[in-house]
Image: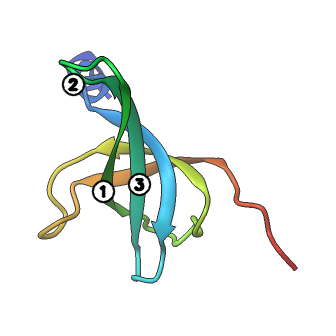
Amino acid sequence: MTEEKTRERSLRKTRTGTVVSDRQDKTLVVKVQRRAAHARYHKVVTHTKKYYVHDENNEARTGDVVEIMETRPLSKMKRWRLVSIVQRAAVDE
């Protein structure tokens, strides 16, 4: 990869979140939480956002903590792809 492409790829946004749904083929729904202080009242508020993520090999499962990266549009709603699985969900058997 050229130096220019490497620099461009490093500018892509990454997020870490929890897989909420893995029912679709090659698609995950990932919930990402961020905490920020309210502008006026200064109370810490948790903001939640869902991202549709491309998972080529159907590796991740519900409850896994995953790292995702911004990419080109893959479908109507998918704009992110799976980079790695940070932590597997506990298996209840």
Task: Count neighbours of disc 3 (C-alpha within 10 A) and say few if under 14, some if 14 to 19, many if 20 or more.
Answer: some
Residue 4 figure quarter: top left
2 left or right, relative to 72: right
Q: Which residue is mark 2?
A: 8
Dot 2 amino acid type = Glu
Q: Nearer the viewer, mark 1 or mark 2?
A: 1
Decide which of 29, 37 is in the foreground and name it: 37
Q: Is residue 12 above or below residue 71?
A: above
Q: CA distance from mark 1 to mark 2?
A: 22 Å
x and y, in percent, of residue 7 in the image: 26, 18
Q: Residue at x 19, y 19 (%)?
A: 39
Q: CA distance from mark 3 to mark 1?
A: 7 Å
60 left or right, relative to 6: right
- Mark identifier at residue 51: 1
SS class of the residue under badge 1? strand
Q: Residue at x 33, y 25 (%)?
A: 36
Dot 1 amino acid type = Tyr
Dot 3 amino acid type = Lys
Residue 3 figure quarter: top left
Which quarter of the rendering shows the N terminus? top left
Decide which of 43, 85 is in the foreground and name it: 43
Task: Count neighbours of disc 1 (C-alpha within 10 A) and say few if under 14, some if 14 to 19, many if 20 or more.
Answer: many
Q: Is residue 4 above or below residue 46?
A: above
